[in-house]
Amino acid sequence: MQPSLDHQRLEQYLVYIAEQVDSVAERVQSDAEAEELRRDPLAMDGVVYRLQTAIQAMIDVAYQLCAHAFSTAPDGAAHAFELLQQHGLLSEEMLQKTRRMSRFRNLAVRGYLRRDEAMVMEIARNHLEDFHSGGAQLPRR
């Protein structure tokens, strides 16, 4: 029996992702704000955490979609996104983006990131729109 898709829960995930991404975007709007963020280790930790949890929420959405649409549990985040791409729910370009996001999340969770501010700032200043280009429309605040 195919599990039912919990639309309310998915919407909660999408709202959460949008909130996290928007909060990061607010911190790096100007060069001065970005520079201030670089100098504040606790604020930088907050940015990493918000990016990490937004990506985790994306992974959770992918798992739920796979369970509902394909009645299968993916072997991991990468497999979940690959299944979505194979079934036409994710573009090849977005598959590549989600792979990079998942790698960043893994680095952050396991502590391997070791405060690579350049990487964090590159994501925060130039790649937040990737969260909005995944097919699902994130609510804009």
Image (cartoon, rainbow, N blue to C red):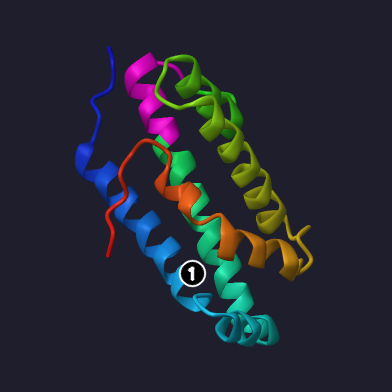
Q: Is residue 25 magenta?
A: no
Residue positioned most to the left: 8
Q: Quadrant of the N terminus?
A: top left
Give the side of residue 108 with respect to residue 128, left or right: right
Q: Which one is nearer the viewer's eye here, 118 or 109?
A: 118
Task: From the top left corner, tell me how far across and down residue 109 is, in percent.
Answer: 66, 56
Q: Secondary structure at mark 1?
A: helix
Residue 22 % position (x, y):
40, 66
- Say above or below: 47 vs 103: below
Which region is colored magenta?
62-72
Magenta segment's dominant SS is helix
Mark 1 lies on residue: 24
Dot 1 alpha-carbon crowd within 10 angstroms: few under 14, some 14 to 19, many 20 or more: many
Answer with the quarter of the image where residue 49 lies: bottom right
Q: Residue 125: x and y, percent?
A: 57, 65
Residue 52 image point, x, y percent: 56, 57
Queried whether the magenta region covers residue 70, the answer comes back as yes
Residue found 78% across the figure and 57% down from its top: 112
| Residue type of the residue flagged with mark 1 | Val
Q: Is residue 129 above or below residue 80?
A: below
Give above or below for 23 relative to 75.
below
Residue 41 image-quadrant placement: bottom right
| Residue in the picture at 60% in, 66% down | 48
Q: Residue at x 30, y 55 (%)?
A: 15
| Quadrant the C terminus occupies | bottom left
